[in-house]
């Protein structure tokens, strides 16, 4: 252990004492590296402080020193290209299109009728259109045309009626069907036996098809409200043959019966009596 004496003020006044001041040297290791630090204004490896104080060598190369008016878009050269002073493209001629007026002495096609040779004239037919058969007379139908109907009063969403029948849906016919051995319903107006399709009111009052149309127009027996309660009905004579017994012999196949019911139900959605 080396003992270093402590200097006092009286020691500095002593003429025999030589006072020497030496600068302290820096350590070899600085900021984790032994490489010497560059302190110039320009060059590589400048600190942010040096970059902030470094002068600009090329001060006319900034973004504000360029003129971008002539290269602002890709269409600049096309829109501002040099054009001809004459106002036309290259290789264009300035000569008149029609140098002289062309006059024809021949009359136009509408001013003369050339004669047709006799051998070119067509021969007349014996009958018009070379057909001597009689024209059939067209029968005019009394059914009104398609434009006479007003479909605005018909509902757009039309659905047929079905019965679920425990998971097996069955189509409900629009015309009520009864199975009888012998028709016994008589028309209230003409007192004739109702056959085919006819109309009923609570299965007590019956009207045949002809009397129903007559009653619809004149309203002699029923008013508008009572007449609207009538419903169409038919017997089974078109599909069964009873032969005066309770047994029913089918004369119409089931597939044709289903097709008939399906067609009537579909037309009933559009045609209202």
Image (cartoon, rainbow, N blue to C red):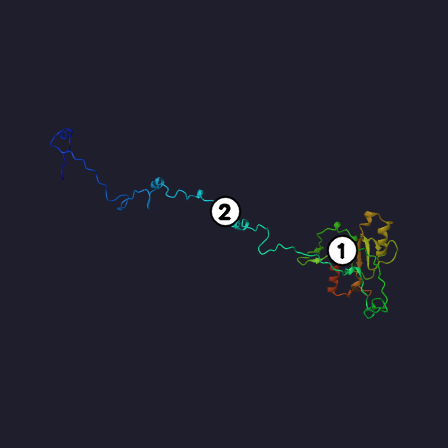
Residue 214: % across, % down: 86, 53
Residue 14: % across, % down: 12, 30
Residue at (74%, 62%) from the top-left corner?
Answer: 259
Residue that label 2 marks: 70
Q: Report the residue that reaches farthest toward the front.
A: 100
- The answer to whether residue 272 of the structure is visible from this angle is no
- First reached walking from the N terminus: tag 1 or tag 2: 2
Residue that label 1 marks: 268
Q: Residues within 10 Å of mark 2 (few under 14, many from 20)?
A: few
- The answer to whether residue 224 of the structure is visible from this angle is yes
Residue at (80%, 58%) from the top-left corner?
Answer: 234
In the depicted view, which residue is nearer to us: 23 or 93? 93
Residue 177: % across, % down: 78, 58
Left or right placement of residue 111 versus residue 94 in this view: right
Q: Is residue 39 above or below residue 178?
A: above
Q: Which mark is residue 112?
A: none
């Amino acid at each position: 252990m080396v003992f270093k004496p402590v200097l006092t003020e009286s020691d500095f006044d002593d003429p025999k004492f030589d006072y020497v001041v030496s600068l302290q040297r820096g350590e070899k290791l600085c900021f984790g590296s032994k490489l010497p630090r560059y302190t110039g204004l320009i060059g590589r490896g400048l600190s942010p402080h040096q970059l902030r104080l470094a002068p600009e060598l090329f001060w006319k190369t900034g973004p504000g020193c360029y003129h971008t008016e002539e290269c602002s878009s890709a269409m600049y050269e096309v829109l501002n290209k040099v054009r001809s002073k004459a106002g036309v493209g290259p290789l264009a001629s300035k000569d008149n299109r029609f140098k002289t007026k062309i006059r024809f002495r021949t009359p136009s096609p509408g001013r003369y009728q050339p004669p047709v040779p006799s051998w070119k004239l067509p021969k007349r037919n014996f009958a018009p259109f070379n057909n001597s058969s009689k024209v059939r007379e067209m029968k005019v139908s009394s059914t009104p045309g398609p434009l006479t109907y007003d479909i605005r009063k018909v509902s757009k969403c039309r659905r047929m009626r079905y019965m679920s029948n425990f998971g097996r849906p069955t189509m409900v016919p629009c015309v009520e069907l009864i199975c009888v051995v012998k028709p016994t319903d008589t028309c209230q107006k003409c007192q004739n036996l109702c056959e085919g399709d006819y109309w009923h009111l609570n299965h007590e009052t019956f009207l045949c098809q002809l009397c129903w149309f007559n009653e619809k127009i004149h309203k002699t027996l029923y008013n508008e409200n009572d007449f609207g309660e009538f419903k169409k009905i038919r017997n089974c004579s078109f599909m069964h043959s009873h032969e005066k017994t309770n047994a029913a012999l089918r004369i119409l196949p089931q597939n044709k019966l289903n097709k008939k019911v399906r067609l009537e139900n579909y037309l009933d959605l559009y045609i209202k009596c």
